[in-house]
Image (tube, rainbow, N blue to C red):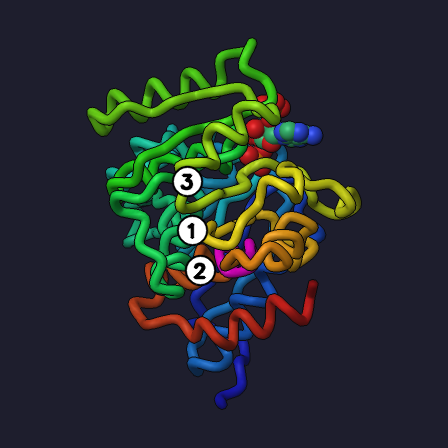
Amino acid sequence: MMKNSISGKTRVCGIIGDPIEHTMSPAIHNAAFTKMGLDYVYVAFRVKAEELGEAIEGMRALNMRGLSVTIPHKVAALKFLDKLDPLAEKIGAVNTIVNDDGVLTGYNTDATGFLQAMLEREVEPKGRNIVILGAGGASRAVSFILADRGANLVILNRRLELDWAVELAHRISQTFSKKVEALELNRENLIKALEKADILVNATSVGMSPRSNETPVPFDLLRNQLIVYDIVYNPVKTKLLREAEAAGAETISGVDMLVWQGALAFEKWTGLKAPVELMKEEAFKHL
Ligand code: ATR
């Protein structure tokens, strides 16, 4: 393993968000850079919403190689970029920026990382019936990539009155010429949707620390033929995943998505295959 030391040639990457002080990304990325002997460094920047444009222009001016983009900037960042990956454009959100000699391109590795964590487990979403809980930012990325991959989707959301879920389902239906259902998240609809489901994805924040005693799906509705994927990564094993395991279901943790979104960003910045296992170990150290 080579030591990372900052030099005049060091390439700079980072993460912008607000708040940002609890991010694990610097630990994960710097561990990966060190492991691969790369002269790169990754730092966190708290960027206020009203200064997002200046921050992204600053990336160009300082010739930074890449940025991760997190809450609340994933949608607003789009308008400051020169190019968008087609999937990021469809989703309408980016979490990764690559700077190629002043040309800034946006990607959504939340979406591709979410998928990669499934494929790594040999779970292929194509043609499967998938129930997605939630219709917020995270659900958007997840729903678009699953539809793009050819899955059949039902989206359940607590609030339907604001038409978020309906709007999301409509956008996906139009984009992929595929019918997507949107229903209110309640027991009756859960029973109905889960009857035909192969995979259940929790894309809500329910179960996230400090409210880790909550779960979006009652235990009695879980069963062993289901694959349960929770995008919440703190705690690593949410109540939903613990109960799914107890019901005999296969589970995928949000940590895998977190690590893969970082790994795919790493690959875009460096052009090298990311040390995914090491990045996972590093993430676990901080959870
Ligand atoms: P994120 O970027 O993490 O997706 P978000 O855009 O605020 O964050 O979306 C949060 C999602 O979790 C929404 O689908 C939200 O449902 P509402 O649209 O009804 O607010 C869902 N969510 C949050 N708390 C919830 C709860 N206690 N029960 C059910 N759904 C909840």
Q: Magenta region: which residues?
A: 253-258
For mark 3, does the 10 Å Cα neighbourhood hold few (<14), some (14 to 19), or many (20 or more) residues? some
- In percent of width and height, residue 47 lies at 61, 40
Q: Position of residue 265 (x, y in %)?
A: 40, 57
Give the Cα distance between marks 3 and 1: 19 Å
Type of amino acid at the residue the image marks with label 2: Trp
The location of residue 91, given as percent across then percent down, is 36, 33
Closer to viewer: mark 3 or mark 1:
3
**Residue denoted by label 2:** 260
Inter-mark Cα distance, 2 to 1? 7 Å
Give the structural element (helix, strand or loop) at label 3.
Answer: loop
Q: Which residue is mark 3?
A: 197
Q: Is residue 30 visible?
A: yes
Residue that appears at 50% across and 37% down: 138
Q: Which residue occupies 45% across, 53% down?
A: 225
* Amino acid type of the residue tagged 3 in the rendering: Ala
User: Quick one: which residue is furthest to the bottom in this view?
Assistant: 1
Q: Which residue is pictured at 39% across the width and 57% down the height?
A: 118
Whichever of callouts 2 and 3 sits on the residue coming sooner in the sequence is: 3
- Circle 1 sits in a helix, a strand or a loop, which is it? helix
Q: Which residue is mark 1?
A: 114
In the rendered image of this protein, does residue 178 appear above or below residue 29? above
Q: Quadrant of residue 24?
A: bottom right
- Please name whichever residue, 185 or 46, is drawn nearer the observer in this view of the structure: 185
Is disc 1's CB within 8 Å of ligand 1?
Answer: no
Q: Nearer the viewer, mark 2 or mark 3?
A: 3
CB under 8 Å between callouts 2 and 1?
A: yes
In the foreground, 126 or 281: 126
